[in-house]
Every structure is written in structure tokens, then in C-alpha cells.
Image (tube, rainbow, N blue to C red):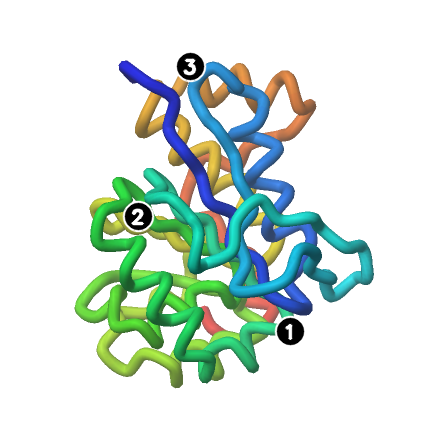
Amino acid sequence: MARRLSIAGVLFREFELLDLFGPLEMFGLLPEQFEISLVAETGDRVASTQGPVSVINYRFDDSPRFDLLLVPGGRGTRREVDNPAMLEWLQDQARTASYVTSVCTGSALLARTGLLDGRRATTNKAAFEWVCSQGKKVKWQKKARWVEDERFFTSSGVSAGIDMSLAVIARLLGEQQAEQVATWSEYEWHRDPGWDPFAEVHGLS
């Protein structure tokens, strides 16, 4: 890449910690290639589902354009699917972003914007029915660790976002670089996007 890509981790009250910080750890191990910011609608701090609070870099109304969006899931998505400010910001940023990604029920937010209409996507299998109801025109994949559809990457639940982020790194910088990141983080990367034992656990296969 000729320049560092800017990444926006999108925060909202009751987001899932690992959904966000698992992928950001992977990107963050390549500081010469990626610049990470946390963005939220309002305020300076946002509490996760698990309790820890994150300090944001930008609010929606003063944020720059980003090259990559990362939308986590968590209990808060059930509220945010009806938040016009969230949906409008995602739609606006997605117009110019090179990549739009989500983890877990974060894909419900993308679905509500219409960004996933006609595209293949996946989500947390434990919440599959609810997420599917947020986007009737989305081609939801029941069995998938993550799904790539052009510039859109969506993953299954929680830890699956780490595998997805490594796939994004592989797309941008090559598989060897993604493998190096996995090694640095002592993570066993599931390279097959179709590997999804949790689909069967939740009766979806």
C-alpha cells in the first residue's frame, strides 16, 4: 500500500469487547500500514457490554473519512438498528470507504442501512434469525466463519472477527503478511471461511 489506511472502530453503548478489539489487535500489529480510530455518535467514553469503557477519538459529527469501517456486535445492536444517526453515518462513510466490515450482530446494522442488499453476508449463529429479519434482501449465509462480497466482509460471532480481519489483511497485503500477524499474536488462524462448527450447534446446517 502506498499509504496507511485509516480504520474506524464504530462504538455504541453495550458493544462486544472482542468483536472490536480482537480485529483491531490484528490491524494494530501493522502500525505502518493502518491507523486506528474509535468513533461514536456522542460523548467521550462508551461502555461495552462487559463493562470496560473506551475513549473515542471522534464523534460522528466531526469525524474524517475512513478507508475501512469495523462495526462490532453486542447487545447494543438491538437498540442501534433503530438509531437514525448510526445508520446515516454508516451509509455516508460507506460511500467512500474501501472496505466495510462487521463482526457478529454488527451485520444487522449494515443490513438496516441497505448496504448489504443483494450481497452475501453472515452473522453470529446464536442471533441468526433476528439479524436476518433486519435485512430481507441480504443473502444470509447460514454456515460461514466469514463472508467476503467485494469490499464487504462480515463475520460470525465474536472471535470469528479475528479470522475475518486476517482475511482483510491477506487481501490488502498478501497471505504471508496475514500469517505473520497471526504468528505475532500467537493466534491459530482459521483460513477457511466455510469452517463454521457453530452453525450446527445452533441448528443452521
81 vs 92, nearest the viewer: 92
Q: Secondary structure at mark 2?
A: strand
Quarter of the image where the C terminus is located = bottom left
Quarter of the image where the N terminus is located = top left
Q: Amino acid at mark 1?
A: Arg
70 vs 64, nearest the viewer: 64
Circle 2 residue: 148
What residue is rendered at 64% in x and 73% in y?
Answer: 75
In the rendered image, residue 195, in percent from the top left (x then y), is placed at 47, 48
In the rendered image, residue 90, in percent from the top left (x then y), is placed at 36, 61
Q: Is residue 129 left or right of residue 184?
A: left
Q: How many marks?
A: 3
Relative height, residue 4 to residue 140 (above, below): above
Relative height, residue 66 to residue 86 (above, below): above
Q: Is residue 199 visible?
A: no
What residue is rendered at 29% in x and 51% in y?
Answer: 152
Answer whether labels 3 and 2 touch (C-beta < 8 Å): no
Q: Which mark is residue 176?
A: 3
In the rendered image, residue 141, in percent from the top left (x then y), is placed at 35, 65
66 vs 132, nearest the viewer: 66
What residue is rendered at 54% in x and 58% in y?
Answer: 40
Distance (Cα) linking label 3 and label 1: 35 Å
Q: Secondary structure at mark 1?
A: loop
Quarter assignment of residue 174? top left
- Closer to viewer: mark 3 or mark 1: 1
What residue is rendered at 80% in x and 55% in y?
Answer: 52
Q: Residue furthest right?
A: 51
Circle 1 residue: 75
At label 1, counting other C-alpha atoms closer than 10 Å, the crowd grade (few under 14, some 14-19, many 20 or more) is some
Distance (Cα) linking label 3 and label 2: 19 Å
